[in-house]
Image (cartoon, rainbow, N blue to C red):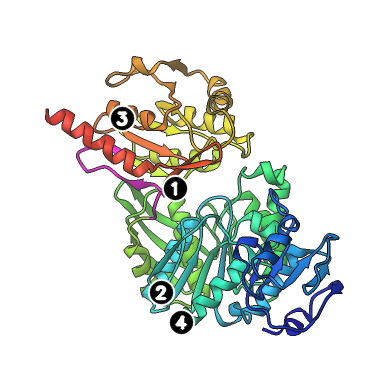
């Protein structure tokens, strides 16, 4: 694309060098620079792109967008703007020819449930015959292809590139998990969303947002600023933050819930370890659904997806079929055990609210005991650590506190902060050697090695017990220091179950 065409609508402070020339590509990582590319220097959270301008030029970049004063190279066009990050999104939209204008774009935001809602809505839309793309925490996928995802919502330029590839592949509908970071950093500002879904809000990411109010304001921005006037929003008004959101910006909203009579609701449902049976009430009528998914929180996810489908005028038979055909979501209360074993689940719950919700739901089905294995991530919101400890202690018969992704923090220091919430209760601390086989008294154990913790939980569980391995879900790694190593809760749990079976067989 011609440089003059690409930059003509930008808020430019100054240009040094030629305004003519053809831009071959755009990048914000100097390592991806190529001949005649345009490099956008962004002041990031960890790195400053302005420090890599010379590297980008060495690799072939001919055009530079910057917001700080920099040294000017002869033969290179330097374009100074007020905000490089905001400019990146505008450039991406222009360079890739505004791909979201050719898609039905659906955004899902909230603390918990985003991933499951995207999977459910994808299943419903595919049942109705649409070609669907998804961008989310686990991966992004379209046209039979799946790509690894490193963050929930990609950078603005990457989003526009993905959307253009989806359009070229014939995709009609795209569902995006929209994170609070993405909203705060403007990654989705140049996307034309047709529908927004709010699941819930509870404490998370306060290492970044500092306060819960700031976190909520980032989420609210999606509905007040990103969704254009006349576009629909789906809001959970059983959630207090959802009610506040609906009061502030929900004039075009469709509400859902269980506790309140909303636009989409269910007051007839049964929950079991075999799944969900429910009658869903929507503006068009009633739908009797069955789902292999487990728990009341998943009924909320089903209601959110059904409300979105209703707004999109999807016929009831496809809503019903789509819900029924989705057997599981990777790492979201994923059962990894057999029918004659303790019920072992792997779940992504990594906030107090998510952990409490999962354990409350599992408590409805327990006949004996619940054993919970969990930890907290390092270099993240420290305030939630004792809260998660308290939730695990309250709803578990045995809590095994272990490592999650400690990153650059000392794992034992993280565990100590979790213990503060556990110690505020009345349960006692035991040693791992106290639990060679089975246990009778409520308590907790500290085992920093996550593999050892998972093996102990499964070894001592009785057949009718429930084991929850929480915090990492679909992740297949642990982050120790700056290093990412392989680690998969589901694989470790299955190995522990195999050892349990072979031990009994012997």
Residue 247 appears in the picture as rendered: no
Q: Position of residue 200 (x, y in %)?
A: 58, 52
Along the polypeptide, which appears first: circle 3 or circle 1?
Answer: 3
Which one is nearer the viewer's eye here, 273 or 287? 273
Q: Relative to 170, is 11 above or below? A: above
The residue at 42%/63% (across/down) is 120
Which one is nearer the viewer's eye here, 478 or 311? 478
Residue 237, image quadrant = bottom right
Q: Is residue 116 left or right of residue 252?
A: left
Q: Magenta segment range?
A: 329-343
The residue at 38%/43% (across/down) is 488
Which secondary structure class fits the magenta region best? loop
Asked which secondary structure carries label 3, the reply is loop
Please name the residue that numbered disc 3 is placed on.
Answer: 368
Along the polypeptide, which appears first: circle 4 or circle 2?
Answer: 2
Along the polypeptide, which appears first: circle 2 or circle 1?
Answer: 2
Please name the residue that numbered disc 1 is placed on.
Answer: 475
Q: How many numbered marks, from 0 up?
A: 4
Q: Are marks 4 and 2 in contact (CB under 8 Å)?
A: yes
Please name the residue that numbered disc 4 is placed on.
Answer: 170
Q: Quadrant of the N terminus?
A: bottom right
Q: Give the numbered dot on residue 143.
A: 2
Mark nearer the viewer, 3 or 1: 1
Along the polypeptide, which appears first: circle 4 or circle 1?
Answer: 4
Q: Is residue 67 left or right of residue 38?
A: right
Asked which secondary structure carries label 1, the reply is loop
Q: Are marks 3 and 4 in contact (CB under 8 Å)?
A: no
Give the spatial CA distance, label 3 vs label 4.
51 Å
Give the spatial CA distance, label 3 vs label 1.
29 Å
Residue 431 appears in the picture as rendered: yes
């Amino acid at each position: 694309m011609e440089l003059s065409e690409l930059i003509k609508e930008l808020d430019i402070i100054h240009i040094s060098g030629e305004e003519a020339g053809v831009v071959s590509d755009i990048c914000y990582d100097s390592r991806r620079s190529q001949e005649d590319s345009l490099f956008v220097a962004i002041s990031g959270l960890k790195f400053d792109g302005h420090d890599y301008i010379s590297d980008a030029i060495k690799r072939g970049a001919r055009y530079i967008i910057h917001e700080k004063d920099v040294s000017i190279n002869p033969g290179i066009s330097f374009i100074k703007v007020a905000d490089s990050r905001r400019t990146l999104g505008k450039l991406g939209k222009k360079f890739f020819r505004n791909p979201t204008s050719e898609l039905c774009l659906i955004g899902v935001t909230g603390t918990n449930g985003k991933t499951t809602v995207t999977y459910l809505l994808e299943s419903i839309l595919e049942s109705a015959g649409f070609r669907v793309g998804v961008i989310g925490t686990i991966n992004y996928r379209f046209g039979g292809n799946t790509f690894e995802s490193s963050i929930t919502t990609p950078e603005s330029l990457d989003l526009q590139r993905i959307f253009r590839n989806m359009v070229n592949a014939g995709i009609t509908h795209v569902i995006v998990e929209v994170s609070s970071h993405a909203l705060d950093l403007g990654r989705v500002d140049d996307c034309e969303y047709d529908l927004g879904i709010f699941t819930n809000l509870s404490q998370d990411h306060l290492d970044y947002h500092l306060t819960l109010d700031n976190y909520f304001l980032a989420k609210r921005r999606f509905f007040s600023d990103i969704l254009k006037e006349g576009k629909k929003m789906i809001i959970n008004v059983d959630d207090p933050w959802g009610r506040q959101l609906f009061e502030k910006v929900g004039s075009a909203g469709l509400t859902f819930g269980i506790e309140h009579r909303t636009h989409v609701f269910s007051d007839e449902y049964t929950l079991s370890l075999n799944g969900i049976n429910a009658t869903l009430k929507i503006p068009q009528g009633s739908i009797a659904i069955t789902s292999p998914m487990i728990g009341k929180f998943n009924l909320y996810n089903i209601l959110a997806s059904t409300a979105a489908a209703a707004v999109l005028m999807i016929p009831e038979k496809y809503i019903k079929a789509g819900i029924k055909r989705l057997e599981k979501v990777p790492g979201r209360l994923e059962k990894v055990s057999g029918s004659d074993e303790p019920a072992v689940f792997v779940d992504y719950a990594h906030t107090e609210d998510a952990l409490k919700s999962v354990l409350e739901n599992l408590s409805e089905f327990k006949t004996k005991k619940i054993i919970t294995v969990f930890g907290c991530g390092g270099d993240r919101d420290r305030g939630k650590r004792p809260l998660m400890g308290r939730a695990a202690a309250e709803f578990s018969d045995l809590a095994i506190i272990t490592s999650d992704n400690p990153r650059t923090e000392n794992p034992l220091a993280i565990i100590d902060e979790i213990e503060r919430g556990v110690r505020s209760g009345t349960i006692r601390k035991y040693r791992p050697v106290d639990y060679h086989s089975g246990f009778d008294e409520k308590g907790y154990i500290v085992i920093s090695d996550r593999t050892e913790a998972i093996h102990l939980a499964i070894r001592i569980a009785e057949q009718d017990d429930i084991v929850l391995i929480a915090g990492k879900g679909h992740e297949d790694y642990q982050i120790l220091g700056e290093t990412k190593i392989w680690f998969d809760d589901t694989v470790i749990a299955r190995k522990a179950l195999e050892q349990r079976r072979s031990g009994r067989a012997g």
